[in-house]
Amino acid sequence: MTKQEKANEIQQILDKLYPTTPIPLDHKDPYTLLIAVLLSAQCTDVRVNQVTPHLFAKADNPTEMIKLEVEEIKAIIRPCGLSPRKSKAISELSHIILNEHDGVVPQSFEALEELPGVGHKTASVVMAQAFGIPAMPIDTHIHRLAYRWTLSTGKNVVKTEKDLKKLFPKESWNKLHLQIIFFGREYCPARGHDPLGCPICSKYGRKSLL
């Protein structure tokens, strides 16, 4: 079986298991999604969804956010971890969005990645989920699964992104990255994983993992 054939069959499995892919982070617009994704770094989506209602009750747009002191933001988002860095980034990017983008979250990878605290993965999530622009956000979970399923060498997330983009149709990327995340949580966790009981690893996984 070629790698492309394997990718096609894996996509069929994911489409069957996850025909719909609700966005895990609660938000109402591109700005609140951007903040939620930024907060999700090294934090669970569940925890982020517990914290953002408190933050967004005070400020759910850049105009209101810049009125908050960084220390106040930090106190609210502390449960998400890395609060000193994240609070500073939230304040700074809100100023930039207002001053350089007329208060609107920019719709380009380049502009998003220039914002404080926003890397390529965060920008990709916003482009995909807020604007519907094809992107393949690669987090540690997708990186790990792509290696387990021998779809990528696992050298780094940049290589994994390129490999997956070659194997899967562009129009499927936005849905696919969520399907892989959902699958990883349900069937293919980092720890305590049973390769033989996994619907994908049992058929297509690396032999060294079985």
Image (spheres, grey):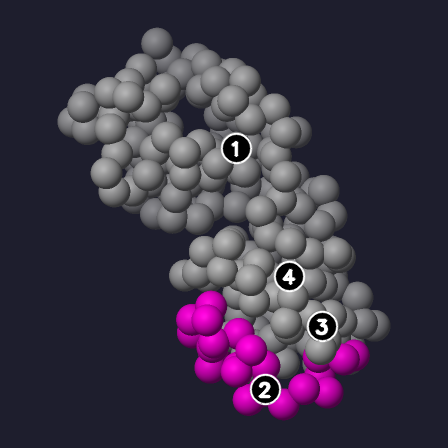
* Disc 2 target residue: 72
Q: Main secondary structure of the magenta part?
A: helix
Amino acid under disc 3: Ala
Looking at marks 3 and 4 on the same chain, the residue that comes earlier in the sequence is marked by 4
User: Would residue 4 be seen by someone viewing this image from the given angle?
Assistant: no
Question: Quick one: which residue is furthest to the right in this view?
Answer: 102
| Mark 1 and mark 4 residues within 8 Å of each other at the beta carbon | no
> What is the x, y in percent for residue 48?
53, 61
Say which element carries label 2: helix
The label nearer to you, 2 versus 4, is 2
Confirm whether residue 183 shows in the render.
yes
Q: Which residues are magenta?
A: 63-85
* Residue highlighted by disc 3: 57
- Against 170, residue 140 (above or below) is below
The residue beneath circle 4 is: 34
**Mark 3: secondary structure:** helix
Q: 101 or 79, which lies in front? A: 79
Q: Earlier in the sequence, mark 2 or mark 1?
A: 2
Q: CA distance from mark 3 to mark 4?
A: 16 Å
Q: Residues within 10 Å of mark 1 (few under 14, many from 20)?
A: many
